[in-house]
C-alpha cells in the first residue's frame, strides 16, 4: 500500500477540490508556469513558504503538502491560526459561510464562517469593514483574535489574554475600546480568528 503521494498527485487533489491553478499559484507564491510543472511531474518538492500557503488555502495538513505522507485532513482541535501580531492578509477566494454580526448563538454558528467587523476595536491589525474568518472548533491561545459574546449575547472581536483559574481578558488593540473580563462580563469564546480573506487597508 502506497503511503506517499507525489506533488503532482497532491496538486491534482487540490484542483479536484475546486482550487484553480491561479489560486494555487497565489497561495504558494509561485508563477502559473511553476504550478504547471507540478502537474507535469517536473517538480518534486515545495518550499516551506509554499507549503504554508497551500495549507492555508486548502485547509489541509502542511505535513501532507510538504511530503505527501499520511492524511491531508487536520485533526480536530490541533489546527491553529497565527496570532494577531503575525496576521497576514489574503485576497484568495473563501467559500466559508458568511454570517451577520451578532445574529447567531454558538450552537447555530457554522464551524468556519466569515463576518464583517463592525468597529475599529482591533485596529491597527483589523479595521472596521474587514471580512474576517473564524473557526469555532479550536481553542484560543494567548494573542489569538477571538469572537466573544457577553451575557446579553452581544458580540465583540478582541485579543485573547488568559488569566488564572480559567479566567481571561478580551483586550482591544485600540485604546478607545474597553477591555472585557470573562468573569465580570460573563464572556464566552465563540470562535478563534483564522484569517482575513478580504481586507480594505485604505
Image (cartoon, helix red, strand yellow):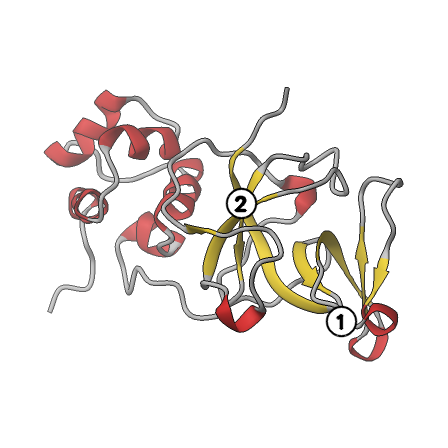
Q: Up-down: is 127 above or below 137?
A: above
Where residue 129 sits, quadrant-wise, is top right
Quadrant holding the N terminus: bottom left
Task: Give the residue pinned by disc 1.
Answer: 151
Q: Position of residue 156 (x, y in %)?
A: 72, 54
Q: Up-down: is 109 above or below 96?
A: below
- Residue appearing at x 44%, y 43% in the figure: 52
Give SS at disc 1. loop
* Residue 157 placement, left or right of 108: right
Pick the residue in front: 95 or 51.
Answer: 95
Give SS at disc 2. strand
Quadrant holding the C terminus: top right
Q: Up-down: is 59 above or below 124?
A: below
Q: Earlier in the sequence, mark 2 or mark 1?
A: 1
* Residue 123 placement, left or right of 52: right
* Residue 170 placement, left or right of 13: right
- Residue appearing at x 80%, y 43% in the figure: 173
Pick the residue in front: 88 or 134.
Answer: 134
Q: Which mark is residue 79?
A: none
Number of marks:
2
Task: Give the residue pinned by disc 2.
Answer: 195
- Residue appearing at x 14%, y 35% in the figure: 39
Q: Position of residue 15 (x, y in %)?
A: 20, 42
Separation of residues labelled 2 and 1 (CA atoms): 26 Å
Near mark 2 (Cα within 10 A), the count class, few <14, some 14-19 or many ≥20, is: many
Amino acid at each position: 500500500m502506497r503511503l506517499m503521494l507525489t506533488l503532482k498527485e497532491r496538486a491534482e487533489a487540490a484542483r479536484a477540490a475546486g482550487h484553480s491553478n491561479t489560486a494555487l499559484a497565489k497561495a504558494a507564491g509561485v508563477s502559473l508556469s511553476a504550478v504547471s510543472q507540478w502537474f507535469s511531474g517536473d517538480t518534486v518538492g515545495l518550499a516551506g513558504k509554499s507549503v504554508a500557503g497551500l495549507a492555508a488555502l486548502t485547509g489541509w495538513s502542511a505535513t501532507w503538502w510538504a511530503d505527501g505522507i499520511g492524511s491531508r485532513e487536520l485533526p480536530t482541535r490541533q489546527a491553529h491560526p497565527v496570532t494577531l501580531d503575525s496576521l497576514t492578509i489574503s485576497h484568495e477566494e473563501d467559500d466559508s459561510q458568511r454570517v451577520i454580526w451578532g445574529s447567531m448563538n454558538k450552537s447555530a454558528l457554522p464551524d468556519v464562517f466569515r463576518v464583517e467587523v463592525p468597529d475599529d476595536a482591533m485596529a491597527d491589525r483589523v479595521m472596521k469593514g474587514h471580512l474576517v474568518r473564524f473557526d469555532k472548533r479550536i481553542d484560543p491561545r494567548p494573542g489569538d483574535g477571538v469572537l466573544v459574546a457577553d451575557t446579553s449575547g452581544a458580540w465583540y472581536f478582541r485579543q485573547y489574554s488568559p488569566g488564572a483559574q480559567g479566567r481571561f481578558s478580551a483586550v482591544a488593540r485600540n485604546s478607545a475600546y474597553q477591555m472585557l473580563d470573562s468573569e465580570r462580563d460573563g464572556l464566552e469564546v465563540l470562535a478563534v480568528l483564522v484569517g482575513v480573506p478580504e481586507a480594505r487597508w485604505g
